[in-house]
Image (cartoon, grey):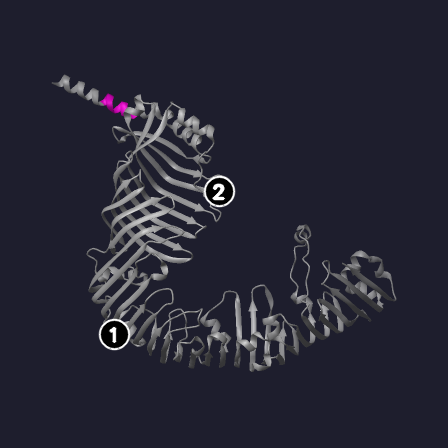
Amino acid sequence: MKKVLKIFAGFILIVFIAILLIPVFFKGKIKELIISEFAKNTEATIYFDDFNLSLLRNFPNFTLSLDEMGIIGTGVFAQDTLFKVGELSATVDLNQVLFGDELSLKSIAADGADITIIVLEDGTANYDIAKVSEEVEEEVADEESAAVSLGLESISITNSEFIYFDQSLPYFMQLSGMNVKGEGDFANDIFDLKTTGKIDDVEVSYDNVDYLHNKSIDLNVILSMDLTNSKYTFKDNVIKVNDFPLSADGSFTMLEDGYGMDLKFSSPGAEFKQLLSLVPAVYASSFDELKAAGNLNFNGSLNGIYNDESMPAFSFDLNIKDGDFRYPDLPDAIKNVQLSVAIDNPSGVIEDTKVDLKNLHLEMGSNPFDAKLLIENLRDYTMTAAINGQLNLAEIGNYYPMEGYEMRGLINIKANASGVYDSVRNIVPKMDIGLSLENGYIKTPDVPSAVQNLNLSAGVVNKSGKMSDTEITVDNLSLNLDGQEFMAQMKLINPDNFSWDVKSSGSLDLEKLMALYPMEGMELKGKIQTSLQSSGNMKDLEAERYSRLPTSGDFVLTDFSYKGEGLDQEISISNAEAKFDNNSITLANYSGKAGSTSYSMNGKIENYLGFALNNEVLTGALNVEADQLNVNEWMTETDEEEVTESGEPMEVVRIPENVVFNLTTKVNRVKYNSLNLNNMAGRVEVKNGAVSLNNAGFDALNGTVSATGVYDSKPEKPTFDFKLGAKEISIPASFQSIDMVQRMAPVTEKMTGLFSTDFNISGA
């Protein structure tokens, strides 16, 4: 007996050693097959850190694995990774490895995969990596040497992410936290595919509209796969989106010119609470502890062909009866939720879609809300609608989590509409809409000050159904933000030729505004007081009849100061007043300080509306006076070597040809480096795309300097012509005050006397 046991133990040892050593003997063979098959069939590049074989993981099958494996694209995607994975493993039949010329993969598993599919606007796709030459195709077809085939029974993906971005649609899908397994006999043309698993986060958008956002999906689906006819039939299946169950019945077919659909949807066993899981704010806030009740029924269908020329017929119905939900630790509920809505399209023509919100009723605390809407079609939008509701802002915190928020006020909305909307015939439904808010108060956790005394009274009325008879009014909008009052009134009539009458007034404390909405690296102080009145209509505006558009207002800025990054000196304005009407803006009583410079300005700009709206000629004049200007305090260090070696050509400065502007300046004293300039004055004129410098000059170095000239930007290569004159300039003073003279003409240190000169600078 002992001898038998020893023989058996020896046999087991030999088998175990064989299990360990066989992978070593055949590792090179399989590795060469992987690399050669990939290179033979694709243009892309494959890489991996390590390659392993084992008989222990899935005995009696080989398990081969690639660690830190990836595929790099080709063409325009030559620098992009199409696929990368922490570990990619596959099982291979042992008998085929030992005695066969072909390797059949029985299962594939990917862990930590990152798959990115991109299709550019021109249709170029990063997954298009296969070789297409006839030589390669013939070689693959005729070759009888070892190859890799797919006899798969299962595919699993864990801890992975998948991104599909088709810029030609544009369509975007991202699946994060994928843990999914598919099982079936993939070698057959007809088989059942069972898919189970979960995707933690699903994002789907089409044409920049989000259809799924931050949704999880649980999968338990059996599909009958008819690969020959590209037809896929749903069998037993339940898909959960967040907590909401969906089931499909029917088939989906891939056609040459689109997709064939014969599908029905339902929500078996769904409850009202599960529907609430689709609302992001509800699902993210203590959803498991949320108390909810109510009956729910959802069903829908798709039937027909989807392609560039047609859509399937579709219908969706959702009904909720006696629903209510209450957050944990809150005293009140949103209750008595009743909903019946149907969307139906029997033809597949989108204009035949009917939307019928038969009933919506809910009660938020003591506040009821009711709504109905019927849109007969999307052709002329024949509709009837009614809304009647009330909301007490102070009660919201009783039934919805509002940590850090304070709100008060009573909102009332009442709306009725019936008729046809047809923009071609200028027809709209008859409507009577009213919205009001009384004694509003809103305080949010991110803003230290509250909006108080918030009142709103607004409405939209159309009694005839003609678009021209539509009237939009804001009888009163008023609020107080941290002691600053704002008020406005508005009336808009006739959207065909909008007539408006607008009035507003208010004040704003910039320092308080910065406390409410701080901006990094910036300090603002000052008070703004403004008022505006404007009336008119679009036809007069478009016809440039600005005299028929009475517009007036004023703007007063006091005790303003600005400090910011990149500006070493503070800018302040002690007072500035601007008045405007429909033709001009007048600046008066402007006094300020920039660094150590005190200055004042006044002036006028005319035809600003014509300039802004119709590119007409803008005219204006501005006078600036300053006591002194220390240029040194505004200078910053410059990397001269970087500027010199950049090699970038200077851009041409184009002067608008429809601007006529005069700037008159006077500065008592200017300091630049060690140079003092006194009585600097001049006049700059902008006209017809050119800038002229007239009667400019200053006193310096015991003499005077004058300058006149013009820069014309109209030619393709702008031209300039300037005349400079210097009179009785002191040579010793020049040496003492100008560094360039010291460097380039040191001999002048020993010279005395005066010099005068005139010279021109011109060119293109």
| Identity, as a three-letter code, of the amino acid under mark 2 | Phe
Q: Is residue 234 left or right of residue 718?
A: left
Quarter of the view holding residue 354: bottom left
Residue 140, magenta (yes or no): no
The residue at 35%/43% (across/down) is: 112
> Can you tell which of label 2 and label 1 is closer to the viewer?
2
Q: Look at the image and give the residue range highlighted in magenta.
A: 13-20
Across and down, in percent, residue 755 comes to 87, 66
Q: Looking at the image, which is closer to me, 750 or 211?
A: 211
The residue at 35%/29% (across/down) is: 148
Q: Looking at the image, which is closer to me, 127 or 704?
A: 127
Name above or below for residue 542 compared with residue 141.
below
Q: Is residue 486 left or right of residue 263?
A: right
The residue at 78%/57% (across/down) is: 743
Q: Is residue 88 visible?
A: yes
- The residue at the far top in this view is 3
Q: Is residue 286 visible?
A: no
Across and down, in percent, residue 550 comes to 56, 82
Q: Looking at the image, which is closer to me, 450 or 369?
A: 369
Residue placed under numbered mark 1 in the picture:
365
Residue placed under numbered mark 2 in the picture:
77
| Identity, as a three-letter code, of the amino acid under mark 1 | Gly
- The residue at the far left in this view is 1
Q: Main secondary structure of the magenta part?
A: helix
